[in-house]
Image (tube, rainbow, N blue to C red):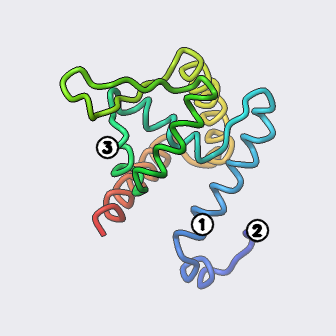
C-alpha cells in the first residue's frame, strides 16, 4: 500500500504504472463491496464500458482497442452474452463481422457501475478543484494515447 508520507524522491522514482495499479486495485475492491448483487469482474467491466462508448463496435475492433487477441474477446463476450449483458449480431453489410451492443440488463449494469464509479472518483479526488481534476483527466487521456502509440 502507498504510505501517506513518502518523500519527494520516492514519489518521483515510483513508476506511473505502480500508482495506476494501486488505484485500480482500490477501485476493484470498492466495486466488489458495492456490487454484491451483480456478478461482474473488473475485466468484464472494461468490455462493458468500451461496448457502451463505441456503439456498433465489432469484436475485432474491440480486440484492437483493448490490445488483446480476438480469441480473448470471443471468450469474454461469450461470458457477457451468457450473463445477459451483451448481445452479438451479424453486421447486415458484412456477415463475417459481429456487432456488439449492451442489452437492457447491460445498460442497467452500466448505469449502476457508472454511478458508483462517479461516487468513488469524487471521494478520491475530494482535495482537487474541478480545474485540477479536469487537468488530471486531460493528462491521463494524453498518457493513454502516448502509451497506445508505443
Crowding near the residue tagged with mark 1, few <14, some 14–19, many ≥20 C-alpha atoms within 10 Å: some
Alpha-carbon span between mark 3 and mark 1: 28 Å
Circle nearer the viewer, 3 or 1: 3
The answer to whether 124 appears left or right of 74 in the picture is right
The answer to whether 11 appears left or right of 134 in the picture is right
User: Residue at label 1?
Assistant: 19
Residue 77 in the image, given as x and y percentages of width and height: 51, 37
Instruction: Residue at 51%, 19% (x, y): give it.
Output: 103
Instruction: Residue at 45%, 51% (x, y): give it.
Output: 71
**Quadrant in which the N terminus is drawn:** bottom right
Chain-order first, disc 3 or disc 2: 2
Residue projecting furthest to the front: 95
Q: Secondary structure at mark 3?
A: helix
Classify residue 78 by image quadrant: top right
Crowding near the residue tagged with mark 3, few <14, some 14–19, many ≥20 C-alpha atoms within 10 Å: some
Alpha-carbon span between mark 1 and mark 2: 10 Å
**Quadrant in which the C terminus is drawn:** bottom left
Instruction: Residue at 64%, 24% (x, y): give it.
Output: 112
User: Residue at label 2?
Assistant: 1
Q: Of the numbered discs in the image, which one, if any, rests on residue 61?
A: 3
Q: Secondary structure at mark 2?
A: loop
Circle nearer the viewer, 3 or 2: 3
Residue 7 in the image, given as x and y percentages of width and height: 67, 81
Residue 76 in the image, given as x and y percentages of width and height: 54, 43
Amino acid at each position: 500500500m502507498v504510505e501517506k508520507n513518502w518523500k519527494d524522491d520516492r514519489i518521483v522514482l515510483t513508476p506511473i504504472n505502480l500508482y495506476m495499479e494501486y488505484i485500480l486495485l482500490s477501485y476493484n475492491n470498492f466495486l466488489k463491496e458495492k456490487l454484491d448483487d451483480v456478478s461482474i469482474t473488473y475485466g468484464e467491466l472494461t468490455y462493458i464500458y468500451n461496448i457502451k462508448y463505441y456503439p456498433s463496435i465489432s469484436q475485432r475492433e474491440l480486440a484492437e482497442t483493448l490490445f488483446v487477441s480476438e480469441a480473448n474477446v470471443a471468450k469474454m463476450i461469450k461470458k457477457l452474452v451468457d450473463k445477459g449483458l451483451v448481445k452479438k449480431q451479424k453486421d447486415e453489410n458484412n456477415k463475417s463481422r459481429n456487432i456488439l451492443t449492451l442489452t437492457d440488463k447491460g445498460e442497467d449494469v452500466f448505469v449502476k457501475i457508472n454511478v458508483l464509479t462517479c461516487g468513488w472518483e469524487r471521494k478520491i479526488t475530494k482535495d482537487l478543484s474541478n480545474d485540477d481534476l479536469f487537468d488530471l483527466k486531460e493528462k491521463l487521456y494524453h498518457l493513454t494515447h502516448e502509451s497506445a502509440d508505443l
